[in-house]
Amino acid sequence: MKFSLLALATLAITALANNSGGGGSGGGAPSSGGYCPDCKIQGVNNVTTKFLKGNCKWAHKTDKKDPNFLINLSKGQNPPLLWIGCSDSRVPETVITNSRPGDIFVHRNIANMVPLTDDNSLAVLDYAVLHVGVSDVVVVGHTKCGGATAAYNAVHPPATPAEPVTDDPSVESHLTSWLAPLIALTKALPGNATIEDVVEHNVAAQVDNVVQSPIVQNAWKQGKDVRVHGWVYDLETGLLHDLGLTRTKADCTD
Ligand SMILES: [Zn+2]
């Protein structure tokens, strides 16, 4: 049997939807005593042991606090928000917004970017907006962003440049290529712009990309009331700031 590309994509999306919701057969309901109560689990080294034990404790505590939470969550998801953030370990969206699993659909990459040529971020945007049905999309930059700093330093080389991590440029070609639009954005800013200016202008540029994407334009054309926002997280205060960039279906240009 031959499948068209569209049919294959539909099959894949259906499988993804069933996997993320749809109530499959389930792997056994968590119940009190279903987890290792003493979390004696061992990883293959200290790092993996730390995180596996942490998971064990979390699962046990979560199940004890609300025995229905995990099993209900396994039946489907209905998050209202898509978070497009930076991969930085200091900006864990669920923790810093006091949220729970199931609350936020997430895409994170270096410097929270949504290039209109990037299948990865656009596939997440597509799935979140047109399939999961989030009502709000937020691009979240953060202070002291390594990606923004790298772009800034490429335009304003520091007096003592960092030692290269490798003498083979091809090793870092993906990172170099990924940062190219951010470097171009930085070059276009006034000469006295700071790294935090780069962070804010980058959020604005990515909000524009989300809005201009065929996905959001199509959602708006369908009458979906999807809103797009731009925030910056301050690492030192732990607070999110709304940059006032919110766009709504009134901005539909398609
Ligand atoms: Zn960052």
Image (cartoon, rainbow, N blue to C red):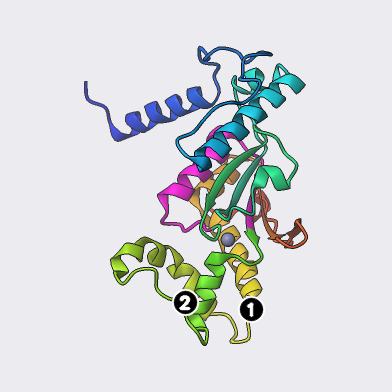
Specify the amino acid type for callout 2: Ala
| Residue 189, image x, y percentages | 58, 80
Q: Is residue 43 magenta?
A: no
The kind of secondary structure element at disc 1 is loop
Q: Residue at x 55, y 27 (%)?
A: 41
Q: Amino acid at mark 1?
A: Thr
Q: Earlier in the sequence, mark 2 or mark 1?
A: 2
What is the secondary structure assignment of the residue under circle 2? loop
Image-based side of 28 in relation to 250, left or right: left
- The quadrant holding residue 204 is bottom right
Where on the picture, by quarter, is residue 77?
Answer: top right
Q: Which residue is depicted at the point 67% across and 37% down?
A: 80
Closer to the camera in the image, 225 or 25: 25
Which residue is at 51% across, 46% downward?
215
| Mark 2 lies within 8 Å of ligand 1 (Cβ measured) | no
Depicted 78 relative to depicted 92: above or below? above
Q: Give the foreground label among 2 and 1.
A: 2
Crowding near the residue tagged with mark 1, few <14, some 14–19, many ≥20 C-alpha atoms within 10 Å: some
| Residue stretch rendered in magenta on the structure | 113-140
In depth, the one of 169 and 32 nearer the eye is 32
Identify the residue at image location x=64%, y=78%: 194
Q: Which residue is mark 2?
A: 162
Residue bearing mark 1: 194
| Image quadrant, ligand 1 | bottom right
Residue 199 on image: x %, y %: 62, 68
- Residue 81, horizontal then vertical, whole percent: 66, 41
Residue 130 in the magenta stretch? The answer is yes
Q: Quadrant of the N terminus?
A: top left
Residue 195 visible, this angle: yes
> Badge 2, how many Cα within 10 Å: few under 14, some, many 20+?
few
Q: Is mark 1 within 8 Å of ligand 1?
A: no
In this picture, is 79 found above or below 246? above
